[in-house]
Image (cartoon, grey):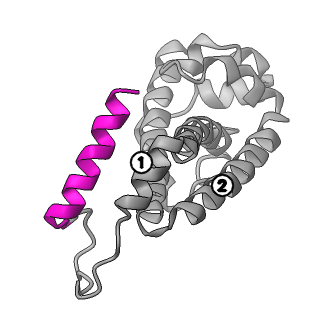
Amino acid sequence: MEATIRAIQNRINECIRHDYWFLENRIFLKLQYFSEEQSKSFLNQELADTTDELANLHDNTVIQSITDYAENLDFLWESTFIETLTSSEKKKYANFDTSTLDVKQYTTKNDSYDEALPYFSQIVKFIVLSKYVLLLNKKAEYYQSPKISEEVKKMSIEPISDVKPQIKQTFECHFDDRQIEILTKILEKQQHV
């Protein structure tokens, strides 16, 4: 059973990376176009919504079993997850053919594996949102800092109106020299925090 659980864990970790990457990039892109006040308001609302969602997920005993192990890449095996499953749920995990677990299918329909692997999508969502709350808190602290606040006011990133939308759907960014300088200063300040 251990080998199967660890193989499932690897796939769950891939799903977590995918979903977290999506949220992380979404927030970065949104904050680029918000004013400082809009950013503060957005972050506060996003934090409230995300913690509400986490609290709802945490009502489940199975999710509670992995809470203290969320930072561990092997949380299914290291936590009391297996012990909290019913005997029929344990059988589903033990007998699951891990070669059929496709991350692309999960990204298309998050709950596509919940029948075969109970709580699969809830587990991924809980870990992703736990990490996302940490990111939101860091961003909120950044915008609350008076020193950073003044610098953001001086160097706000303005959208470039003459940029035409790109047709291809990649994550290629084209920043001008001023935007690169702003991002560099922000990253340097983050490294010293």
Q: In the image, 18: left or right of 2?
A: left
Task: Work out whether residue 101 can be spotted.
Answer: no
Pointer 2 residue: 46
- Nearer the observer, 21 or 28: 28
User: Magenta stretch mostly in which secondary structure?
Assistant: helix
Q: Secondary structure at mark 2?
A: helix
Residue 170 within the magenta-colored segment of the rendering: no
Side of 141 relative to 151 (left or right): right
Magenta range: 174-193
Q: Residue at x 32, y 30 (%)?
A: 191
**Residue in the picture at 80% in, 39% down:** 55
Q: Is residue 1 above or below residue 149?
A: above
Q: Which residue is mark 1?
A: 21
Say above or below: 35 vs 92: below
Question: Residue at the spot x=41%, y=27% of the render?
Answer: 193
Q: Residue 54: x percent and y percent? A: 73, 41
The residue that appears at 28% across and 72% down in the rendered structure is 169
Q: Amino acid at mark 2?
A: Glu
